[in-house]
Image (cartoon, rainbow, N blue to C red):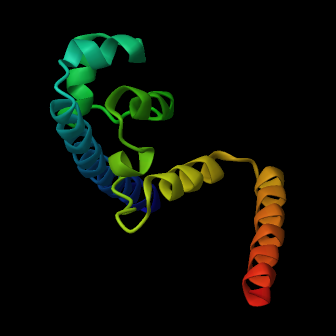
Amino acid sequence: MYIFNVRQFLFCATSIIISGMSALAKQIGNRIKTARLAAELTQEEVAAPLGIGRAAYSNIENGHSLVTVDHLLKLPAILHKPVTHFLGIETENLTPAEAEWLELYRILPADAKALVLGFVQVAAQQARERAQER
């Protein structure tokens, strides 16, 4: 009886995870497709720089396959949209430069993030002091 319950639990948990991934794959795929159409590119023109075939790319757009991290990182250069766009992270209030800073910051390792943050904090403090002097 115990083994049956564990199997049942694992089956249900796996179904929930797959269902969630499927919904996520469809959302990301729709955003990718919308960006491709806005850029007036064919599926082949996007698939080639990703190093995949048109059919594999079509599966990504249709949500049958989840886009890989490698492909996701290549899409901004191809479709001229930030990674955050494809992931559904709202950056509408940010300027393009701010969005780029955020994207670049997010891919840094923790030690580099600490260095960048320290530098920006010093620069901001200096800017505040100069503003007060005026």
> Is residue 24 left or right of 113 when viewed as pictured?
left
**Residue 86 point in image, percent of width and height:** 34, 46
Q: Quadrant of residue 110?
A: bottom right
In the rendered structure, the answer to whether residue 127 lies left or right of residue 10 reads: right
* Position of 123 relative to 32 (above/below): below
Q: For the N terminus, which image quadrant?
A: bottom left
Q: Residue 75, position in %: x, y?
A: 39, 31
Residue drawn at 24 percent across, 39 percent down: 29
Q: Where's residue 19, x and y in %?
A: 26, 51
Q: Which residue is rendered at x = 22% and y = 26% of the image? A: 59
Q: Is residue 124 visible?
A: yes
Image point 29% across, 10% down: which residue?
53
Residue 55 place in picture, x, y as percent: 21, 14
Left or right of 76: which side holds 59? left
| Quadrant, the C terminus | bottom right
Residue sitting nearer the eye, 37 or 110 = 37
Q: Is residue 45 above or below residue 87?
A: above
Image side of residue 33 versus residue 119, left or right: left
Q: How many marks?
A: 0
Residue 120, compared with residue 124, is above or below; it is above
Q: Nearer the viewer, residue 39 or 31?
A: 39
In this rendering, the answer to whether 33 lies above or below 43 is below
Residue drawn where x is 17% and y is 34% of the image: 62
In the picture as drawn, the residue positioned furthest to the front comes out as 134
